[in-house]
Image: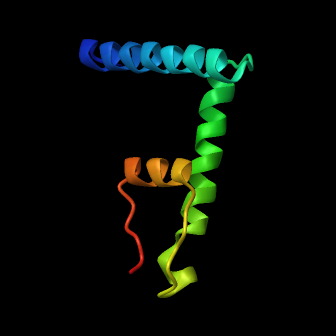
Amino acid sequence: MKTKRENSLNTKKESFLQMVVTKYSKLFGKEMTLKGFVKQLQNKKSRLKKKTEKQKTGNERIELFLRNKILFDGMNGDSNP
């Protein structure tokens, strides 16, 4: 059973995501549902994790696009030297 605090956090998270989806729709002119946006974000995160995996890349310098750098920093990722 969820507590009141968990419920309020879920509603805050959902309202924030809905705001992001509406801004995304206005900016790019694409209609998107909340579920579709979350799925797209998860796919981007998993691709970025594969791209920046240290054991796979060794000591190579990883060059990322600005949009990927922002997401990578948000995920608190470690970069190779």
Q: Residue at x 66, y 37 (%)?
A: 40
What is the quadrant of the C terminus in the image? bottom left
Q: Residue at x 73, y 18 (%)?
A: 29
Q: How many marks?
A: 0
Where is residue 25 drawn, in percent x and y? Answer: 66, 17
Where is residue 22 drawn, in percent x and y? Answer: 58, 13
Q: In the image as oriented, which residue stretches furthest toward the bottom?
A: 59
Q: Is residue 81 left or right of residue 59?
A: left
- Relative height, residue 70 to residue 11 (above, below): below
Where is residue 10 drawn, in percent x and y? Answer: 39, 19
The image quarter containing residue 77 is bottom left
What is the quadrant of the N terminus in the image? top left
> Residue 14 or 26: which is nearer the viewer?
26
Q: In the image as oriented, which residue stretches furthest toward the right?
A: 30
Q: Residue at x 65, y 24 (%)?
A: 35
> Residue 3 or 8: which is nearer the viewer?
8
Q: What colouring method underlies this structural image?
A: rainbow
Q: Is residue 37 left or right of residue 29?
A: left
Q: Residue at x 49, y 79 (%)?
A: 61
Q: Is residue 81 left or right of residue 52?
A: left
